[in-house]
């Protein structure tokens, strides 16, 4: 009996049976449900904010942000369910908000079943008195049909104008933009359908509805992660622009993801699945006509992650998750694989004629093979991290280059290899020093980054870690080449001038930008001929010989490592771009000259956030190459050689000043 009474009390509390509340539980065209203490005042005044949830399961942290913006007060949830919706269907969101999200004094759910309810003065009053409003998912056409031109939409807009928070998920997000897909034909159009006829009747674009100043000029859409809606947002944007007669922005949110926007326009993304907000720049369709497919090039789309910052007022995005370009034609929405890759194979005192024609041919083939390996990754939409590893592995396997197979000998007649790799997106890095048995040290450096929980491992520890992680091991004799052994004998005889000067600085490296806008860098070396006492150069030291930071630069260096370490050369390029606003070419040139002023010789390759590459040398030559989504592979060796590509993609020191 006690259990039955307890259940009845809980039921009464939920439906507010014993609570003096203004809005009746039901009326003409609506039902209402209440939970919590509707007479309890908010803890603090509400403050402006917009919550844009993409549908699916909620990221609770974002919804707690929303509760805080209501002043932990009274929330009104608006929905327009099917006529056969159960009480559980209609109250589920309120229950989840109240019990799991928390932070609300009371929640009232108002379910609309036709347009009549929107003229009920008690409902309009309830909305006006709310500390926060949340528009549920469902069918946005019902919201348009039920609310347009009624006191309800006036009350919602008055709520926003008063500086109180408004949220919505799925359909409740869709109606927030100045222009939106209304689904007025009762369907939910797919990307291929919308792209085939963006001006058609099925693309029902609506405007003049919810009026949010920060979303003026924006077309909204939801469920991006699961429903492949990128193409249809482009179609919505095209039709909306034609209606508005001005450029607009598209904004789509992934499922299980929410964008929380402050009253000043600053926004933060929350996600359960590492989802994104998708920012579509205004598009420029070609010959947009009724019955014709969308044709547009260079559709720029920027991804906003939880690590990004968005200012809706100024329309600025910092630290984007990715920047992509798409094209639309024949009912398809195709991502353009925009990428860049630059490599180096070490440096030396090289002038035309110093290399035999056959040796120069071999070097250029080795560089070209490396470019093709990295390009194969990027061309398929692969990551910059995979690309730089692939490019460097090829150079490590080539005995011409001082890394891996072609490593030079130490004073003791052994081979000790160093390598480093860095992911610009996460700023995670891995490095190894003094490796003696791993075929590809760059792959070991990546394993350190991803599996060790540390950044650098050295000597016996690095060798053991390599074995434990199943990387390919080789006998030390694998690294032997007649040329490198000869160089050691000359070093031991102190005949330094007779050592091949055309490849005296033998380090290899790669930097890349992938189609998601992520940078990466990788460097690998056998060190210096005759190095002693466990000497370690700049290669495995993050910030000295290797670095990658999204939005700024990726760098790989080669030369006299001690000087690159003292100048913190790789990091210096990032800082020159970040703090001095230098372009990649000037930053690279000034840095290599700073190394030279200390007495260090060498070169470096650097790539900026847009894929522009610089090859900076100080009075030496450098084995180098470049390839991009718009440029076939090109290689260069001599100081005066230039890699001439479209625009300003690649420059050497000689071109810079």
Image: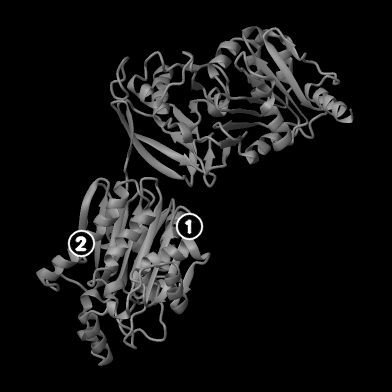
Q: Is residue 612 above or below residue 302?
A: below
Q: Which is in the foreground here, disc 1 or disc 2? A: 1
Q: Earlier in the sequence, mark 1 or mark 2?
A: 1
- Residue 152 figure quarter: top right
Q: Is residue 43 left or right of residue 199?
A: right
Q: Is residue 59 left or right of residue 123?
A: left
Q: Which mark is residue 636?
A: 2
Secondary structure under tag 1 reads loop
Residue furthest to the front in view is: 1
- Residue at image point 29% right, 61% down: 343
Residue furthest to the left in view is: 357
Could you tell me if the residues under marks 1 and 2 are in contact, i.e. CB atoms within 8 Å? no
Q: Is residue 573 above or below residue 214?
A: below
The C terminus, quarter of image:
bottom left
Question: Dot 2, how many residues are within 10 Å of its Cα: few (below 14), some (14-19), or many (20+)?
Answer: many
- Residue 229, x across and y down, in percent: 43, 30
Q: Which mark is residue 129?
A: none
Pointer 1: what residue? 427
């Amino acid at each position: 009996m006690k259990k039955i009474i307890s259940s009845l009390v809980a039921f009464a509390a939920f439906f507010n049976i014993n609570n003096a509340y203004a809005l009746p539980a039901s009326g003409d065209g609506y039902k209402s449900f209440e939970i919590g203490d509707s007479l309890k005042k908010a803890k603090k005044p509400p403050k402006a904010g917009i919550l844009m949830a993409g549908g699916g399961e909620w990221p609770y942290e974002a919804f707690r942000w929303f509760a805080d913006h209501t002043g932990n007060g009274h929330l009104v949830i608006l929905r327009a369910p099917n006529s056969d919706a159960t009480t559980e269907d209609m109250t589920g969101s309120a229950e989840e908000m109240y019990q799991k999200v928390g932070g609300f004094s009371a929640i009232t759910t108002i379910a609309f079943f036709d347009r009549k309810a929107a003229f009920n003065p008690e409902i309009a009053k309830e909305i006006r008195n709310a500390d926060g409003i949340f528009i549920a998912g469902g069918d946005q056409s019902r919201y348009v049909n039920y609310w347009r031109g009624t006191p309800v939409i006036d009350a919602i807009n008055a709520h926003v104008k008063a500086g109180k928070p408004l949220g919505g998920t799925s359909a409740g997000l869709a109606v927030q933009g100045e222009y939106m897909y209304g689904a007025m034909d009762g369907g939910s159009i797919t990307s291929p359908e919308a792209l085939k006829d963006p001006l058609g009747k099925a693309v029902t674009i609506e405007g003049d509805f919810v009026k949010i100043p920060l979303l003026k000029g924006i077309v909204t859409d939801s469920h991006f992660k699961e429903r492949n809606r990128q193409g249809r947002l482009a179609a919505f944007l095209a039709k909306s622009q034609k209606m508005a007669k001005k450029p607009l922005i598209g904004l789509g949110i992934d499922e299980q993801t929410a964008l929380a926007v402050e009253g000043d326009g600053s926004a933060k993304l929350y996600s359960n699945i590492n989802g994104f907000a998708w920012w579509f720049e205004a598009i420029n369709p070609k010959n947009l006509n009724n019955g014709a497919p969308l044709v547009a090039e260079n559709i720029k789309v920027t991804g906003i992650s939880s690590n990004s910052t968005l200012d809706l007022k100024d329309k600025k995005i910092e630290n984007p998750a990715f920047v992509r370009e798409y094209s639309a034609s024949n009912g398809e929405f195709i991502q353009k694989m925009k990428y860049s890759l630059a490599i180096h194979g070490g440096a030396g005192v090289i002038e035309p004629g110093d290399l035999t024609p056959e040796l120069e041919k071999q070097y250029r083939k080795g560089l070209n093979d490396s470019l093709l390996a990295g390009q194969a990754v990027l061309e398929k939409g692969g990551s910059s991290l995979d690309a730089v590893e692939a490019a460097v592995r090829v150079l490590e396997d080539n005995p011409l280059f001082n890394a891996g197979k072609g490593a030079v000998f130490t004073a003791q007649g052994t081979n000790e290899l160093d390598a480093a790799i860095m992911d610009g997106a996460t700023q995670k890095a891995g490095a190894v020093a003094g490796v003696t048995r791993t075929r590809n040290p760059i792959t070991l450096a990546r394993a350190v980054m991803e599996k060790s929980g540390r950044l650098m491992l050295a000597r016996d520890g690095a060798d053991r870690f390599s074995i434990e992680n199943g990387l390919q091991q080789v006998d030390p004799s694998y690294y032997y080449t007649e040329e490198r052994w000869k160089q050691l004998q000359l070093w031991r005889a102190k005949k330094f001038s007779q050592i091949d000067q055309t490849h005296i600085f033998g380090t290899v490296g790669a930097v890349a930008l992938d189609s998601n806008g992520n940078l990466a860098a990788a460097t690998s070396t056998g060190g210096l001929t005759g190095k002693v006492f466990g000497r370690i150069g700049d290669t495995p030291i993050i910030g000295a010989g290797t670095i990658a930071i999204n939005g700024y630069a990726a760098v790989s260096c080669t030369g006299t490592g001690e000087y690159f370490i003292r100048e913190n050369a790789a990091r210096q390029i990032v800082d020159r771009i970040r703090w001095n606003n230098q372009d990649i070419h000037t930053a690279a040139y000034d840095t290599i000259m700073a190394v030279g002023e200390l007495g260090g010789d060498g070169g470096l390759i650097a790539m900026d956030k847009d894929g522009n590459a610089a090859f900076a040398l100080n009075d030496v030559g450098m084995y180098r190459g470049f390839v991009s989504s718009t440029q076939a592979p090109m290689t260069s060796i001599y100081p005066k050689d230039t890699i001439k590509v479209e625009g300003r993609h690649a420059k050497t020191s000689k071109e810079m000043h």
